[in-house]
Image (cartoon, helix red, strand yellow):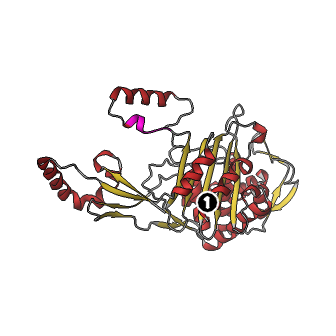
Amino acid sequence: MTGWYAYDFGRSGLESKYSTELAGTASSQTLDRLVDMFTGATPVGATIQTTINPKLQQVAAQQLAGKKGAVVALDPKTGAILAMVSTPTYDPNTLATHDLTAARAAWTALNADPTKPLSDRGTREIYPPGSTFKLVTAATALENGMAADTLINTPSQLTLPNSTSVLGNEGSACGNTQQTMDRALQLSCNTAFANLGAQLGAAKIQAQAEKFGFNTTPMTDVNAAKSQFPTKLDAAQTMLSSIGQYDVAASPLQMAMVVSAICNDGVLKTPYLVSEIRSADLKVLYRHGPDDKQALSSGSAQALQQMMVNVVQKGTGTAAQVSGVVVGGKTGTAQTDLTKNPYAWFVSFAKNPDIAIAVFIEDANVARTDIAGGALAGPIAKALIQASR
């Protein structure tokens, strides 16, 4: 299901986005406006057909109610944005009023609001992705000859190179031995993926991250921020970056793109929100065309799909299980400041019909001990998957 919306091309930044496609109609539109001006006819705008699924959009908004965060859901086979919600939100009608004094007051109040309702947390803000980034590190390993059953040293803690900083694991499940990459992903073992990152090296992980879209502004009709993977890393920084810490930062849109490519057998479809623009007489002015690239091989993608399914079946992502549906996922809890609560992430996919989801919770007004990607964000992904059936 998609939505149709009336649209005036003279009042939006989308005019520049679609200027090439609409150039051929410019002269006729100018003539039409002159006729309208002299005849007194009311100008009629064009219409935009969006990719948003109203049911999924509503479920995402309901699930995020009372929280700071965002949800982005994509169709992996096309790149269509099915849901995109950022909370807290605001009523745009307060800014669209013809009462300029009231509009200025609303704008001032929104900018002063400490919850930052004007921030688009789904596409325009970037955050530490935490352990969800282990998917990128795992993809790098698979693309460089390793396998799901490759054994990785997984100590209970390790001291970072040339440092006194100690990296540990959440809980004791990771043990103090070796784990297969598959099992390390299920348990989200920090020390395993830090060691894996050190073995692979920063350059290989950066190259893989960039294939997923990091360090590049997404070429999409959504005004999205550039997610980042640092380009100059020492040994300790490489290990931290391998688990989504240090200076790694991503938007929920970017992490949804990572999962989308994995779900789509390695092919990354460029996300898009506008599928078609038609004139008042229903003439097609613009229609979205395919735009994709190979982010990783199909073999590596399929291996990683199964690893993500194992995370949901017998790892940290069990809260996202949906009866009778193949669901893969990865949890993430990202600490940014020891004085603040960490962020909670959950990224996932489901099959038949395919959907890729990124859930980000900046603040859910819960105790620090209750914050975990699987516990907070996993159920939201589950609700979206159920709604997509």
Quadrant of the image occupied by residue 106: top left
Residue 309 visible in the current orientation: yes
Give the camera-side residue of 135 and 166: 135
Q: Is residue 274 left or right of residue 366?
A: left
In the rendered image, residue 346, in percent from the top left (x then y), is placed at 67, 52
Q: Position of residue 28 (x, y in %)?
A: 18, 59
Q: Residue at x 73, y 69 (%)?
A: 147
State left or right for residue 67 relative to residue 152. Answer: left
User: Given the image, on which type of amino acid does mark 1 rest?
Assistant: Ala
Quarter holding residue 23: bottom left
Tag 1: Cα neighbours inside 10 Å, few (<14), some, or many (≥20)?
some
Q: In the image, is residue 14 part of the stretch drawn in magenta?
A: no
Give the residue at x 85% y 49%: 156
Q: Nearer the viewer, residue 313 or 4?
A: 4
Q: Looking at the image, which residue sits at the far left?
A: 38
Highlighted magenta segment, given as a residue range: 90-95
Nearer the observer, 381 or 20: 381
Residue 336, horizontal then vertical, whole percent? 67, 38
| Magenta residue check for 94 | yes
Look at 38% across and 27% down and name the residue there. 102
**Vertical comparison of 116 with 276: above or below:** above
Element under disc 1 = helix
Camera sees residue 238 = no
Residue 287 higher or lower than 134, as above or below: below
Residue annotated with mark 1: 387
Counting labels gives 1
**Between 336 and 287, the one nearer to me in the picture:** 287
Query: Quick one: quadrant of the C terminus?
Result: bottom right
The answer to whether residue 263 is left or right of residue 236 is left
Q: Position of residue 289 (x, y in %)?
A: 40, 67
